[in-house]
Image (cartoon, grey):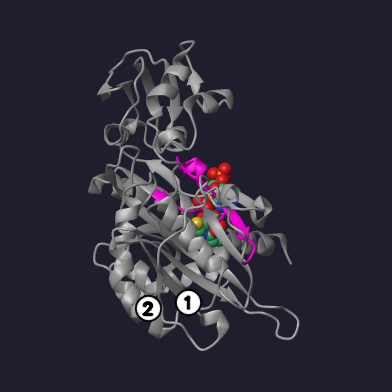
Amino acid sequence: MSTEHAGRAQHDDRTRHDDRTRHDVRTLTDPAQRRAAWDVFLQTLHRGPVQDEPWEAHGQAPDEHWLGAHTAGEVVGCAFSFPTRVTTPGGARIDAAAVSGVGVRADSTRAGRLTALMRAQLTAARDRGDVATVLRASEAAIYGRFGYGIASRAEHVSLTPRPSWRPEAPAGGPVRMLDAAEAAKVLPSLQERLAADRPGGMTRNPRWWRRALSPAGPTASDYKGIAVHTGPDGADDGFAVWGVREADLGRDPGDDITVQQLWAGSPAATAGLWAFLAGIDLIRSVTAWARPRDEDLGLWLVDPRAHRVTGRDDELWVRIVDPAAALAARTWGAGEPVVLRVRDPLFDHWSGTWRLGPDGPSPAGDASPDLECDTAGLGTVFLGDRAPSTLVTAGRWTEHTPGAAARADRLFDVGAPVPWCGTFF
Ligand SMILES: CC(C)(COP(=O)(O)OP(=O)(O)OC[C@H]1O[C@@H](n2cnc3c(N)ncnc32)[C@H](O)[C@@H]1OP(=O)(O)O)[C@@H](O)C(=O)NCCC(=O)NCCS
């Protein structure tokens, strides 16, 4: 190839490369484009395109938000969110966007598309009046740079079938099984009520529920078990939804139950539902992913090792987009006030300084801060999962005034339950 020829080829390659890296982010309103975007997302999870039936059956709500990153007229990246309300310490609920369906096609990654989608999504959330955006991360290294912090952590557990319960364990009330149609009537309002008592608990939408309760199929791997626990006053106060991993017939003594959801409004409901699940016949194990860190079943068991914590992971990630509203939407413990500066890594004009005291936040203008953090650092302490002093020790918050972190610990601690979201989206 002549030098001139090679130069032209190189130039053409660069032009093609530039075309592939150029992108613009737009809201997707056209249902066909949304479906194409969803297929892109599924492809990033190494899945084939969505089938007609689930796509139509699960429907879409008008208030869902769809963003697409376009290149050469094609959607190659997407980010989706739906409106939710997240419980804060003290029991208030903040408006938030629940982020899901984030993906960039493998031939278009590392060219800034996720960054552009995140910026557009955060801006839209703040413009709508949302206080935060929340998500569950596929990989924990992705979202910190966009201002997200780990606001709750959860444990993966296993329970041996038919364990012996100590006499102190609550007896639990009646448990009744439901089919998917009954569950669709009972579970959404019950979950919404129970989620109000737990920081990080979030409301779901009908589409979420339709996907979660899709009718059972004929094989064990399609099976969906659903049961509700009734409290002493006759009202439902807990429920469980589970699937099974099929046994290898002839070799395994039974199937493995995998708990998909378990919500309980009292210790009796917790013990009753776990005892029910572990007492089902023809099972070999009960496992559950992402349980709340205060669900300490071992204390109720004759053999505490029958309940094993097999892992722990980040659960809900919170990205505060409106710090003033977020700080005003939770309660505060007793203690000396502190001045906190919150820096936003992407949108500096969302940064601010507030005086925090038992009565809540007030703007502190240019006052010099006692403590300083970024939005990820605020998200990490916001629901109570970690204390400010822990983040100062880790170098994630800065303490300008000696003793301020200890004061902030007392203010952030309101004795609320350990945060837990309990919803995968
Ligand atoms: C994660 C994903 C969306 C990233 O998209 P992308 O367009 O490549 O991201 P960007 O080019 O905007 O990257 C922005 C920054 O994040 C980093 N980054 C992106 N994905 C990352 C990952 N998986 N792990 C660690 N860092 C990552 C990039 O290196 C880049 O860093 P830099 O600013 O220092 O250069 C894409 O890789 C993907 O679709 N993965 C599979 C599906 C998935 O995990 N989706 C998330 C569901 S919660």
Q: Quick check: 126 left or right of 108?
A: left
What amino acid type is highlighted by mark number 2?
A: Ala
Residue identified by numbered label 1: 224
What amino acid type is highlighted by mark number 1?
A: Lys
Q: Quick check: 379 left or right of 84?
A: right
Residue 408: x %, y % from top left = 42, 21
Q: Is residue 262 above or below residue 48?
A: above
Compare marks 1 and 2 and give the one earlier in the sequence. 2
Q: Is residue 250 above or below residue 174?
A: below
Question: Foreground: 201 or 285?
Answer: 285
Q: Quick check: 396 left or right of 175?
A: right
Residue at 43% in and 38% down: 379
Ligand 1: does it lie within 8 Å of the C-beta at label 2?
A: no
Question: Foreground: 71 or 187?
Answer: 187
Residue 296: x %, y % from top left = 55, 47
Secondary element at image label 1: loop
Query: If the image is split into quadrants, where does the C terminus sit?
Result: bottom left
Residue 319, picture quadrant: top left
Can I make out residue 418 in this image? yes
Q: Residue extending furthest top?
A: 402
User: Which disc, if any, is residue 180?
Assistant: 2
Circles 1 and 2: CB atoms closer than 8 Å: yes
**Residue 129 sits inside the magenta stretch:** no
